[in-house]
Amino acid sequence: AQSVTQLDSHVSVSEGTPVLLRCNYSSSYSPSLFWYVQHPNKGLQLLLKYTSAATLVKGINGFEAEFKKSETSFHLTKPSAHMSDAAEYFCVVSDPAGTYKYIFGTGTRLKVLA
Amino acid sequence: DAGITQSPRHKVTETGTPVTLRCHQTENHRYMYWYRQDPGHGLRLIHYSYGVKDTDKGEVSDGYSVSRSKTEDFLLTLESATSSQTSVYFCAISDRTGTLGNEQFFGPGTRLTVL
């Protein structure tokens, strides 16, 4: 069975400082992994995805994530936070050869302080 | 943006009434999903469809039914709405082909309030 754990429900950073949002997964297969962002009262937008082509994945708006199989992690980072990054972030795992389901983490709400 | 619309966008209804939410896509994607989003729970899968007339239950399917008679439309019905079904509902689509990296695209959401 697949599962996703987002280790922090809330993260606060100051503008201009690095962002780290943590995600651990469990999967019996080689997983697909995704990060989505949701701004207040909006839908979900794809930030980046892991496709096994490279372990370091670059996404939109300066975000990156590194796939570490040995640690079963897919943490999201950004070198310098911007006020517009304040949002909720979801880590998602899916099994490409299985039941067509995507499993969502419970989300991390990022607050950016001026 | 992927062509996904949801209707209505907002709805207030009373306990015990039937409610139908519609998801419409113009992408011709095979897979469609209904989720509900509640604080502290992330997104939870209600039902999904892997083709016309082919649907299956998700983790929170009790009290919900779905239908998909055309590729582009996926309907979610609450047969008799309860206050516990007050939530934000998202439709998603994907075009999974068994390869890695097939992401989902999401609609704008429907905010449902059951009084």
Image: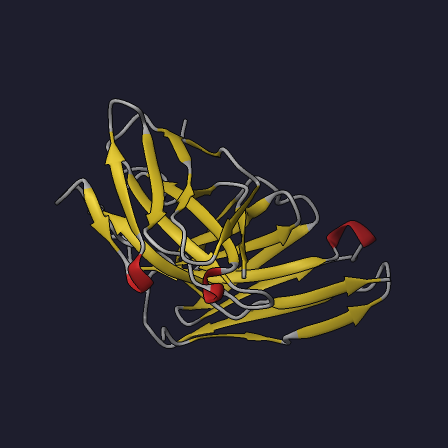
Front one among A51 and A71: A71
Q: Quadrant of residue B66?
A: bottom right
Spot occupied by residue B51 in the image (x, y as percentages of width and height)? 37, 58
Front one among A72 and B54: A72
Identify whether A74 is placed above or below B15.
above
Identify whether A23 is placed above or below B35.
above
Q: Quadrant of residue B28?
A: bottom left
**Which quarter shows the C terminus of chain A?**
bottom right
Front one among A108 and A84: A84
Q: Residue furthest top?
A: A70
Q: How many marks?
A: 0
**Which quarter shows the N terminus of chain A?**
top left
Q: Residue at x 36, y 45 (%)?
A: A76
Spot occupied by residue B82 in the image (x, y as percentages of width and height)? 81, 53
Q: Quadrant of residue A48?
A: bottom left
Spot occupied by residue B35 in the image (x, y as percentages of width and height)? 55, 54
Spot occupied by residue A32 in the image (x, y as percentages of width and height)? 28, 42
Colour approach in the figure: secondary structure
Q: Residue furthest left?
A: A53
Identify whether B115 is placed above or below A110.
below
Q: Residue at x 66, y 50 (%)?
A: B38
The answer to whether any part of residue B10 appears in the image is yes
The answer to whether any part of residue B52 appears in the image is no
